[in-house]
Amino acid sequence: MPGTKYRPGTKVGLTTTIPVEIILAAGLVPVDLNNLFITSDQAYRWVAQAEEAGFPRTVCAWIKGIYATLLDHPEIPVVVAVTQGDCSNTHALMELLQNQGRDLVTFEFPFSRDRRLLAQQIEQLMARFGVEWPQVRQFQATLTPVRQDLHTLDRLTWQEGVVSGRENFQFLIASSDFNSDVAGFAEQLTTFLEEARRRPRRSALVRLGLIGIPPIFNDLFEYLSSLGAEVVFNEIPRQFSMPFAEGDLVEQYLAYTYPYDVFARINDIAEAIKVRQLDGLIHYTQNFCFRQTQDLLLRQRLAVPMLTIEGDRPTALDHRTRMRLEGFVDVLRR
Amino acid sequence: MSCAAEILTRAPLVGLDFGSRFVKLACTTDMVTFVKRKLDTLTFYRDYFRRTPEQVEIDWPRLGLEPPACLVATGYGKHLLQAYLPTITEIRAHFLGARKQTGRNDFILLEIGGQDTKVLYVKEGRVFDFLSNDRCAAGTGRYLENMARFLKMSWQEFTSYSQEPVTISNTCAIFGETELIGHLLDGVPLPRIAAGVNDSVARRALAMLRRYPCRTLVFVGGVARNHAVVNCLRQRGDYQVIIPPDPQFNGALGCCLEARKSMERVGETKNFSYLAK
């Protein structure tokens, strides 16, 4: 089988969340390239470096960051790229990486959310990495308690008020690759939950939902906390944790809202507004990202105050965005 | 007589809107009549204002105002003041000011100032949502000033042109001049170019306003004094446009209302660290 050419422990880069169970079942190490990029203290420099290499200014900084980060990580010989359901810029990114001799595997979330097409994609990925259904199902079962712990952590955020919005975000977003170490991640999560349960319950003055792709700003949560607001719903990171992980793997990734049309996301957000008693939403949009356009539909369909903010590079919040956030929280508080 | 009322009779309340282009002050003792002052921001900062690590000083006699019992500030420069004075967000200040000036509870509030455009959707007497422009300053007061200067027109003349506007497509305040030169070289008459600039500002605002299902528009900020922009909003947007009596002092008036509220909250007045000269 073609997948057998990768030695166990080989690092596999991911451009976004994919059925990670397959990579793990193959004995390989998933590395979410977004997380690798944004957690680096070189993040700003990677973007500039990609521009120096010729990337246009009008391409999203996440793509540029992933490209330059990979240049610095030759130990990642293979990349799984989501070429449908995430970002069309990934196509060109893949071509550049291919040109550098990196192994590329593509994965497509069918826009139609067609079960048969998704199953086909999942099986293609399995064939590529040389794994069969029994191994994948076994790994899915191994991840179940970890995912359940993540759902507990989420509940401790919005229901109990003992987990901050930042902590919630960090743990949930890491579930795209489990920080490349499932056992270590599970242990860290267990320890964290024990500690969090002992904390006194906090009640945030203003309860916010953060929707849209993960923000590139590095101080958003801290700034909101300083204003007396707490994020109690991190839309996309929560999706990464598979909140509807029931049934088989195909069902799990069919229920996942992020890669399909915006309407399933809208239903998910509307439910959160009600259940989590959100006072308002912050819609994060990335400069030059097609998802900015979805703001129109989100505003039309979600009858709750919404502030749309836009980020470009991995920096702290700019003065104007701080002013807007301050105004928004103030409006919701009174 | 309550404690707050007693203070009100002694010294005035002042609202200060520290904008990017002008500093606006509104001063009142009875919340009915207001004394107003408007100064160029740089002039205010240089000649009337002094900040030390411990306090801020404002030259009240030079401003022709009495030292206030309470001062609340807002605006772009409020960061200079917030360690010393109570401050409120621009959103809150304009909301309070517009309600005070119009007596309305349901409207869209458009504020176009020196470098910001804000739109507040006010429903049942509370701010339901708001928008503001992002990084680009095109379509704001400073942009209009620069364009008028470029066309060598007085503000009065510039704001009188709204007929047959030439289409201004450039959204950048810096490169806007390049586009104007292009129209000049094509022989477009100056009034049409001025009308085009005014029209472009209204169109940018309308793109924000159309998100909200309300036909009543309260327009404040310095640009509300631009008749051409107002005409265009009326015609293109089919809005009932209300310009309150003091559009440019709207934020400062909102601060006065907040100052009164502060005075009514016993104890808060002790925290003021500013000194009057």
Image: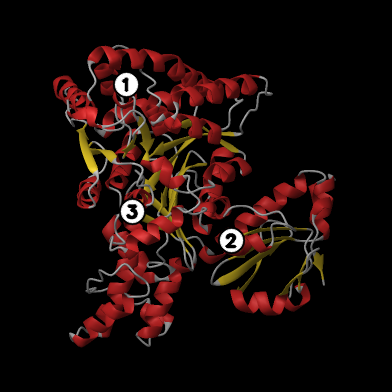
Quadrant of the image occupied by residue A163: top right
Residue B191: x %, y % from top left: 28, 81
- The residue positioned 43% from the left and 25% from the top of the image is A272
From the image, state whether disc 3 or disc 2 is nearer to you: 3
Pointer 1 residue:
A25
Q: Label 2 neighbourhood size at 10 Å, few (<14), some (14-19), many (20+)? A: many
Pointer 2 residue:
B75
Query: Which label's residue is closer to the chain start, 1 or 3?
Result: 1
- The residue positioned 45% from the left and 39% from the top of the image is A305
Looking at the image, residue A127 lies above or below residue B196: above
Name the amino acid, label 3.
Answer: Lys
Q: Are marks 1 and 3 in contact (CB under 8 Å)?
A: no
Residue B165: x %, y % from top left: 24, 73
From the image, state whether disc 1 or disc 2 is nearer to you: 1
Pointer 3 residue:
A64
Discs 1 and 3 lie in a common subunit: yes
